[in-house]
Amino acid sequence: MRRGKPFRLAGAGFRAVTLFAAALAMSGCTSQVDLYDYLGGGSSASGATTGSTTPAPPAGGAGGSSAALQTTGTALAPDMAAADDAKPIADLYNKALKNLQNGSYKEAAKDFSEVERQHPYSSWATRATLMTAYAQYQRNAYDDAMNASQRFITLHPGHKDAVYAYYLLAMCQYEQIRDVKRDQSITEKALTALDEVSRRFPGTNYAHDAEAKAVLARDHLAGKEMEVGRYYSRKKAYLAGINRYKTVLTRYQTTSHTPEALYRLTEAYMALGVRAEAQAAAAVLGHNYPNSDWYKDAYQLLANEGLQPQANSGSWISQAFSSINPF
């Protein structure tokens, strides 16, 4: 993903799915918040001020395209507009900005922090707080980036750019999501933070990006439940497995793991001899995913015992789906 660093998820297959899902989720967004739309610097289309170190806009104009976001998954970036106020604060801020643009993120973070220290009551100090967070994020110093973002929120809760601080908090946690075989507490935190961006700032590009990434986080959490559920099923601890598959259906029903969860329920209930629930699981699977290979397997599993899928309105499985796809 960004800067050639592999995103710590399940693997190439999952990454392809997540990028496709992100593209779908972002398809309604016509423009990306780019380097010139943030922190009050305005668009670079009008030209940089004298002595400005503002970079040229990306290909396609200052508005940019959401395609870059869809294919990289990286965070939206803040504005890199240079300070044009009276010296010496402008020189200090622009030095930090130049380091950031050159990829010297550690030095940039130190310099932006120095702007805050030397000129704590200036408007540039407010900008510098978020730029410190962004510089730390770029060097993968997630804890430092989150601390700076949280400091901005605490000091400037009503600021127009608080959205970016909330967004960066979410991104720092999102980029630490790990393989489904490992603890997923960070994924839970990332999902909570992403949902907060969507809730607090609906309709913004930050919310659009957060919503796309929340889809992927939920899919990842569902994948973890399936991983554990399959383990229990292999150990013939069917009740424990059923509880995991139930979580997928009740909490992550819109994820890609739902068809398999319904099949595994059919399989587990058949192993326990609870045929009515097995038939209900297969019926829900066939109703919602009739062309799925999982449904074909579930149908065959029942047929081997002379049974067929049978809808059962009293089953918890049917009730879990009734609000969306009633029989």
Image (cartoon, rainbow, N blue to C red):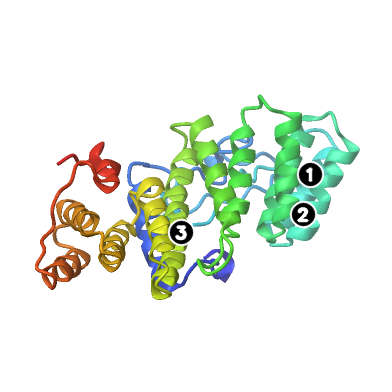
Q: CA distance from mark 2 to mark 3?
A: 34 Å
The numbered disc on residue 220 is: 3
Sequence-earlier tag: 2 or 3 = 2
The image quarter containing residue 152 is top right
Sequence-earlier tag: 1 or 2 = 1
Residue found farthest to the front: 273
Residue 203: image location, x then y, percent: 43, 32
Q: Look at 33% across and 49% down and name the residue there.
A: 254
Q: How many numbered tags mark residues here?
A: 3
Residue 57: image location, x then y, percent: 52, 49
Q: Is residue 21 left or right of residue 140?
A: left
Residue 182: image location, x then y, percent: 57, 67
Q: Amino acid at mark 1?
A: Tyr
* In the image, residue 139 above or below residue 199: below
Residue annotated with mark 2: 108
* In the image, residue 63 above or below residue 162: below
Q: CA distance from mark 3 to mark 1?
A: 40 Å
- The reply to whether residue 51 is visible in this rendering is no
Closer to the eye: label 1 or 2: 2
Q: Amino acid at mark 3?
A: His
Residue annotated with mark 1: 93
Q: Residues within 10 Å of mark 1 (few under 14, many from 20)?
A: many
SS state under label 1? helix
SS state under label 3? helix
Q: Amino acid at mark 2?
A: Ala
Residue found farthest to the top: 158
Q: Look at 64% across and 39% down and name the residue there.
A: 165
